């Protein structure tokens, strides 16, 4: 039998609108993505022989059953589609990594529940381009040519053993 969605008794959308009034423009662009990360990321610490250890995981089930998840995904995708193409430089790297990670998370949440990650064939509209981008195109045409080996570790692919869902958006200064 299909699982019923849990409907929360509170709404985070008014909080997002209030936060948008006081936010940095770069951070505001990713408001919905940031909200999904804050809702879904769980962290915990424990003491080990080498000192405190911090672990983090993304709770897909928690995000999936939040009634506003489709709205957050749709709004962030619309913002990506209508944004001007990013300019070259460090900001470009941050924008494309965030776009890649958000769209991977979006793809996984839209196919939830799934017991395995498959290569996405879905294409996404970004930056007013007339044709959609695939995740492979974003990685191969926009990120790899930047020549930064850290990109490999920043890209979330949804696979066990790969980079995890980031706990926060990437800024051009990080």
Image (cartoon, rainbow, N blue to C red):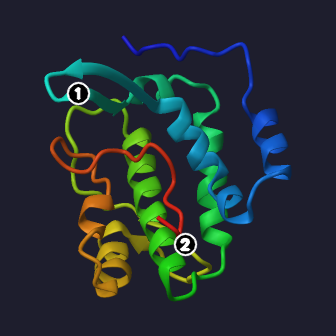
For mark 2, give the secondary structure.
loop
In the rendering, at what x and y percent does residue 54 appear? Answer: 32, 30
Q: Is residue 3 above or below residue 160?
A: above
Front disc: 1 or 2: 1
Horizontally, residue 90 falls left or right of residue 56, namely right
Do tag 1 and tag 2 residues touch (Cβ < 8 Å)? no
Residue 113 location, x and y as percent? 34, 29
Residue name at image x 56 percent, y 83 percent: 130
Q: Nearer the viewer, residue 37 or 129?
A: 37
| Measured Cα–Cα span from mark 1 to mark 2 | 43 Å
**Image position of 151 with respect to 50: above or below:** below
Vertical comparison of 8 with 36: above or below: above
Residue 169, how many percent across, how many down? 51, 54
In the displayed structure image, the side of residue 151 where residue 49 appears, left or right = left
- Residue positioned 66% across, 58% down in the render: 27
Residue labelled with disc 2: 126
């Amino acid at each position: 039998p299909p699982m019923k969605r849990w409907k929360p008794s509170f709404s985070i959308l008014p909080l997002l609108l209030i936060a948008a009034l006081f936010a940095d423009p770069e951070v505001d662009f990713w408001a919905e993505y940031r909200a999904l990360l804050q809702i879904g990321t769980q962290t915990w610490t424990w003491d080990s022989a080498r000192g405190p250890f911090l672990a983090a995981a993304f709770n897909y089930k928690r995000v999936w059953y939040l009634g506003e998840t489709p709205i957050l995904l749709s709004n962030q995708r619309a913002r990506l589609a209508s944004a001007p193409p990013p300019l070259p430089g460090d900001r470009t790297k941050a924008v494309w990594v965030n776009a890649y990670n958000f769209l991977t998370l979006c793809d996984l949440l839209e196919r939830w529940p799934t017991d395995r990650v498959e290569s996405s064939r879905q294409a996404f509209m970004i930056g007013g381009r007339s044709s959609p981008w695939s995740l492979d195109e974003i990685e191969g045409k926009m990120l790899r040519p930047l020549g930064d080996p850290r990109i490999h570790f920043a890209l979330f692919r949804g696979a066990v053993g790969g980079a995890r869902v980031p706990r926060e958006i990437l800024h051009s200064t990080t």
